[in-house]
Image: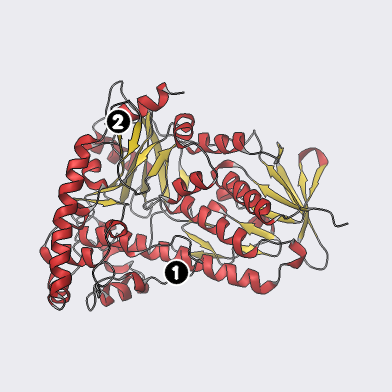
Amino acid sequence: MDEPSHYVIVGGGTAGWIAAFIIQDEARRRGLDFRLSVVESSKIPTVGVGEATTAAFRVLLRHFGIDELEFMRKTDASFKLGIRHEDWRRKGYTYYGPIDDPHQVVQPPAGAPSDYLNVYAVAAGRPVQDMHMFQPLLEQWKAPFARKPDGSLIPLGPFHHAYHFDQALVGKFFASKSKGVEKVDAIVEGIERHPETGDITALVLADNQRLEGDFFIDATGFRKQLIVKELQAPWVSYAHELPVNRALPFWIDVKEGEELPTYTRAWAQNSGWMWQIPTRTRFGCGYVYSDEFSTPEQAKAEVEAALGHEIEVRGDIRFQIGRLEKAWIGNCLAVGLSSSFLEPLESTSIHGTIVQMMLFAQRYMDRPERIEQKARDDYNARVGRQVDDFRTFVNTHYVTERDDTPFWREVRANRLHPETKERLARWQQQMPRAEHFPNYLGGLPHIETQLHYPVLDGLGLLDQSLARREMEAAPKVRQFARETFESLVREYRGAAQQALGHAEFLQIVQDMG
């Protein structure tokens, strides 16, 4: 009888434990005979500077039957309903990117193009964000929940929200929920490889210990310990079009009784941008900048001037923006920061981990000896395309009016990717459509128009006259869109009046524990 396949995940944290959950779940569903080990050293510290997700994370919690309120309580999580972009288009200008999609709740009339509500908003000169349920909640710092007369909590609307949390606590939370996973507290010092195939056969651990396995997942973060250090996987750099390469992280404590925003704050600065992510007890913050245009000392001084107080810097994070040419080589697959990294502007990291591991588990996971090269090639092509899409979306944020510093003059003039230019040119001929973003991920979430529209609109990159012409060509659709837009604005403004304050909701969750 065959021995069970042994999957070994190197590195825990958020990416490693998400990978463990997804692999274990899929193996159970398909009746695969397997063992699963996670190698995570207690000697390697994690810096919890705040992390934001997309709505895919909530879908994941529901899929695994994890109680949302327990998760929020144990990870100091708060709600993320969107992103507040400050000073990107020009200094003093703010726009929001709410993550709900109004098209989900309205049945379009016959012949209506996809994204017809977005097209109408641009044609009418109304901010696209205004018809989103999350918009008034973002503006008023409210939770997407109300309280019924009996005191129970009820969600407002059908849309999935996202979260802010301390990623160090999230890894521990998932580890505590895992069952049947062997946990190995050890430092990996090297690998052993098959002399003919080059596949990894075992990990060499400290104290001359070995851990044999059949398939290995590299979740070692920026260290890329297996996929790059051992297997020398080539790297595709995005440094030209995304020149920020350094981060200065810090915390700001939440004051007693202080209300909390329900958005990630992305605040453009002289040589990059600052993030502020509110968890229940503190803001995880940082300045992502280009050291081509600023020194760490200048970056710190700039942040302190913007905030009006001193900060205690928690590290100096240097990074390469880009992705592996192949995230899967032989019997080793990289996930999370081992696989790719983009500046955290649109919360692509954890989203990418979830989608990539679900894609792998649903389409490619099998006994390792049965996996063929064409499966690896297919996976690498799909995942590479996903990260390239992330790159182009983030790059689009830099198509701005700003020219007040050398950094902004450089990125707007010389750092736009050809695909960014190509898409923007296309959208001067036809308004963005869902069909412009084919799904190559087997139905799993990918970057779509619902995320693009608030950004393109907020940056002034959409042509109102083009939108008007498209609406004028379909009078019935235009009339329906007008009525629907006004109805949604009224309904959602009314719903926001019933919503609980964000801090109030989080306190209720804590009191339930």
Query: In the image, is 217 to the left or to the right of 92?
Result: right
- Which residue sits furthest front? 150
Q: Which amino acid does label 2 sit on?
A: Lys
Quick one: SS at disc 1? loop
Query: In the image, is 222 to the left or to the right of 161?
Result: right
Name the residue nearer the viewer: 363 or 313.
363
- Residue 77: percent from the left, percent from the top? 42, 35
Colouring chosen for the image of the structure: secondary structure
Reading the image, the residue beneath label 1 is 439
Of the two numbered discs 2 and 1 on the same chain, state the one appearing first in sequence: 2
* Residue 121 disc label: none
- Residue 51: percent from the left, percent from the top? 43, 42
Residue 435 versus residue 105 in the image, above or below: below
- From the viewer's perspective, is the residue at label 2 or at label 1 nearer? 2
Residue 28 versus residue 260 in the image, above or below: below
Judge the density around disc 2: few (<14), some (14-19), many (≥20) Cα neighbours within 10 Å: few
Whether residue 91 is visible here, answered yes or no, is no
- Residue 141: percent from the left, percent from the top? 25, 36
